[in-house]
């Protein structure tokens, strides 16, 4: 692990969630790969995690949990609406995902967005000592790196964007485009998921005349800002452990039995988000049923849709479209005792998901646009038996690494249906060869290596 300086993580959400138990509230570790990767690093070298509590209630005082100093950030309800529900989720999110849904431009959201970014920066300045390393995460906090630099000039500052960075032609839609870029350029290292994302960032900075190209990034206000691709990964060992556990194997066997063991199981696991392409995937499956290339006797599609941002109109509309498609398919193609689509609108713990991954013959990861998509890597890691097939969108960052997947264009529904069918009929030897190659990728490059490579470059 590079260096001995402390690490200060700055992210929209904390690594812990407040839970009520018997009238008493406590903080419980949040699930997720980012927490899993950074928690041991923070424990080893010391530091803090700065993030929002997730509510408009007053933020509690800083505290220590599992050896990590936690500094909660509070927001008023109007700030939540302007910063989070507004500019983050209705402007930046759709724009950075290639404007799949039209981004809303509301100038009233800008002031709370700046205010919240400044609050994160001020909290960071209170936590960070002179030579500490500050790592700012994701699209919620693009202004924070420059703000932190103005308050703590000696700190090493990294910024990592977990979602795609759009082409310059799209990014320039933003009225606040220069402010966002200047904020990100306040970092010493700007990390993206893919080379394409990194190049888009460099191109728009050059096109707007904010910086000059350097050997490893950009020259900005007398400093070199390193820019590179650092594709995030998963805790591969943990998912392999889930995949090999007796409990998972028994659960997977029960799942197959309940769905009729001879049926081919296709699986989708996604947040209920319009970027994930769930409705297009269902239309592709419907096309296969209608053409009689598949039937409810032969196959079943299990769709796990995790509720997400449903208070926003675009997300409510996505839920309606998906559930109407499920109802239409089941109404037309169900046979006695056999439903073609099993739909679950809820979240599952990683251990429970592992059973579905082991049971599934074909994993469908078909987003219209995605920074990485860790579900694809989770499926591959769980398949220690080297069984199963992965159908993967070429517009997911994971497709740059998992090149042995069955790659599809999710905007071409007819072609996607054909690839889904081919994946169900692939020979066992070819399927094992593909899965073995993909498993080598996720074993070599797990989330710990991702964090280590980023921090080494930041401190080089």
Image (spheres, rainbow, N blue to C red):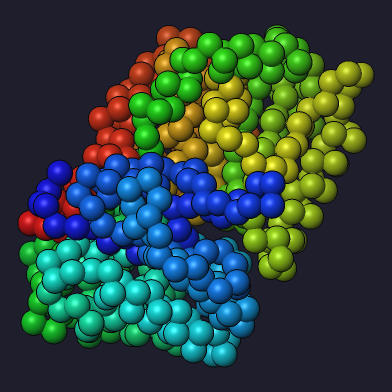
- Residue under the image location 19 percent in, 57 percent down: 6
Q: Judge whether 250 appears above or below 128 on screen.
A: above
Q: Residue at x 8, y 82 (%)?
A: 222
Left or right for 313, reference 9:
right
Residue 440, above or below 73: above
Q: Nearer the viewer, residue 173 or 154?
A: 154
Quadrant for the N terminus, please: top left
Instruction: Please say whether residue 34 is visible from this viewpoint.
Output: yes
Q: Is residue 277 above or below residue 72?
A: above
- Rendering coords of residue 459 (x, y %): 11, 58
Whole-percent x, y for residue 315 in the image: 68, 61
Is residue 138 in view from this perspective? Answer: no
Q: Residue at x 87, y 27 (%)?
A: 334
Residue 271 pos. (x, y %): 60, 48
Q: Is residue 305 left or right of residue 339?
A: left
Question: Is 3 left or right of 343, judged from the image as shown?
Answer: left
- Residue 48, image x and y in percent? 31, 59
The front one of 267 and 311 is 311
Q: Quadrant of residue 156?
A: bottom left
Q: Nearer the viewer, residue 163 or 250?
A: 250
Q: Quadrant of the C terminus?
A: bottom left
């Amino acid at each position: 692990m590079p260096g001995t300086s402390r690490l200060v993580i700055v992210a929209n959400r904390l690594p812990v969630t407040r839970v009520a138990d018997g009238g008493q509230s406590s903080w419980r570790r949040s699930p997720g790969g980012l927490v899993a990767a950074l928690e041991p690093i923070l424990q080893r070298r010391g530091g803090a995690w700065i993030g929002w509590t997730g509510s408009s209630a007053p933020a509690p005082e800083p505290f220590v949990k599992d050896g990590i100093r936690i500094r909660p950030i509070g927001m008023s309800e109007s700030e939540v609406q302007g910063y989070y529900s507004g500019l983050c989720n209705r402007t930046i999110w759709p724009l950075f995902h290639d404007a799949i849904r039209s981004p809303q431009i509301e100038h009233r959201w800008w002031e709370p967005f700046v205010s919240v970014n400044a609050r994160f920066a001020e909290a960071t300045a209170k936590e960070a000592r002179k030579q500490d390393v500050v790592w700012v995460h994701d699209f919620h906090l693009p202004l924070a790196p420059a703000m932190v630099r103005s308050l703590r000039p000696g700190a090493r500052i990294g910024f990592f964007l977990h979602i795609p960075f759009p082409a310059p032609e799209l990014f320039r839609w933003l009225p606040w485009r220069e402010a966002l870029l200047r904020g990100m350029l306040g970092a010493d290292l700007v990390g993206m998921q893919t080379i394409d994302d990194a190049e888009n960032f460099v191109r728009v900075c050059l096109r707007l005349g904010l910086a000059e190209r350097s050997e490893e990034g950009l020259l900005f206000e007398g400093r070199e800002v390193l820019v590179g691709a650092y594709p995030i990964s998963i805790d591969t060992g943990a998912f392999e452990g889930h995949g090999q556990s007796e409990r998972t194997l028994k659960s997977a066997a029960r799942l197959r039995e309940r769905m009729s063991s001879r049926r081919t199981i296709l699986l989708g696991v996604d947040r209920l988000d319009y970027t994930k392409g769930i409705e297009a995937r269902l239309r592709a499956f419907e096309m296969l049923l209608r053409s009689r290339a598949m039937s409810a006797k032969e196959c079943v599609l299990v769709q796990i849709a995790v509720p997400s941002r449903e208070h926003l109109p675009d997300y409510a509309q996505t839920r309606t479209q998906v559930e109407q498609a499920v109802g239409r398919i089941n109404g037309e193609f169900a046979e006695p005792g056999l439903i073609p689509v099993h739909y679950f609108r809820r979240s599952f713990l990683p251990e429970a998901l592992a059973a579905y991954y082991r049971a599934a013959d074909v994993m469908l990861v078909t987003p219209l646009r995605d920074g990485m998509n860790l579900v694809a890597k989770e499926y591959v890691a769980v398949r220690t038996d080297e069984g199963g097939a992965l159908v993967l969108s070429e517009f997911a960052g994971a497709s740059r690494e998992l090149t042995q997947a069955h790659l599809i264009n999710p905007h071409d529904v007819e072609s996607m249906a054909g690839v889904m069918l081919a994946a169900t009929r692939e020979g066992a030897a070819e399927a094992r060869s593909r899965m073995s190659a993909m498993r080598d990728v996720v074993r070599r490059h797990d989330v710990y290596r991702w964090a280590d490579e980023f921090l080494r470059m930041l401190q080089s």
